[in-house]
Amino acid sequence: MNALDYFRATFGLREHEVLFIPYGSKVYGTAGKDSDDDYIAIVPANRKATTGEEYWRDNVNIHIYNRNHFQDQLNRHKIHALEAYYLPDGQVAKQFSFTLDVKALRHEVCAKASNSFVKAKKKLEVEKDFYIGWKSLFHSLRILNFGKQIAAYGNIQDYGAANKYWFEIRDAQQYDWQYFKDKYQPVYNNLATEFRKVAPKL
């Protein structure tokens, strides 16, 4: 059995009862040879599985949501739910309802991007967890880019649109927050401005 089969067996789920949605680096196109396979698993609301729980097997990481909680995350415009909803295969869009609310999108994207930028500083400057710091900085820029696409086009047209930032950040092999702040604070500010233009306050 592969990791997805083991997941179904662990939680007593039949194949049609769980929806596996890929996300993360392999969707964006930034995966390296050691990258995990990341999935969201949406399970029936009444089955034994705790929303927010993570399941690991080998190099597979699965984040669990029951259907009701995932719908709530989608309604609240949580970026991971929107990334799943707009995937080209349309699996999520076929099974869940969603109406874009630009005000809610603006609030959620700005908050999430800001949190990721602050996390990058903490990881680099305080905790010395450099790889996670680099990833957090990339995510702050990626989230704004995705938000801009959603507001402008009503979907995510290019999941790899922000990848250049990741490769720059990773390949710079810098460990000083000030280096990244000087280089990417203007990029962050510009992306935030562009996003707010297409997602204005109503």
Image: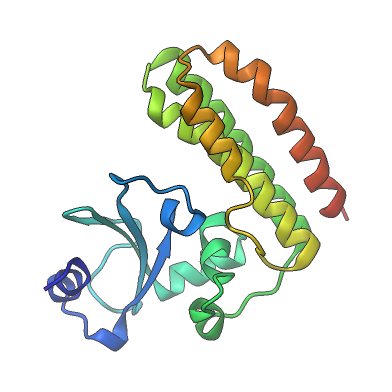
Which residue is at the front of the view, 176 or 52?
176
Question: Which scheme is used to colour this image of the protein?
Answer: rainbow
Note whether 129 is above or below 11 in the view shown.
above
Q: Is residue 102 left or right of residue 114?
A: right
Direction from residue 58 to residue 79 in the image, left or right: right
Q: Is residue 50 above or below residue 29?
A: below
Q: How many marks?
A: 0
Answer whether residue 178 is visible to the viewer in this image.
yes
Q: Is residue 152 above or below residue 17?
A: above
- The image quadrant of residue 184 is top right
Q: Is residue 172 above or below residue 110?
A: above
Image quarter of the N terminus: bottom left
Task: Please tell me which residue is depicted at 59% across the width and 19% down the height of the picture.
Answer: 180
The image position of residue 186, as x and y in percent, is 74, 25
What's the residue at 60%, 80% (across, down)?
Answer: 97
Measured from the top left, where is residue 102 in percent x and y? 77, 60
Measured as percent of width and height from the top left, residue 28 is found at 51, 54
x%, y% of residue 52?
35, 56
Report which quarter residue 75 is drawn in: bottom right
Residue drawn at 63 percent across, 34 percent down? 114
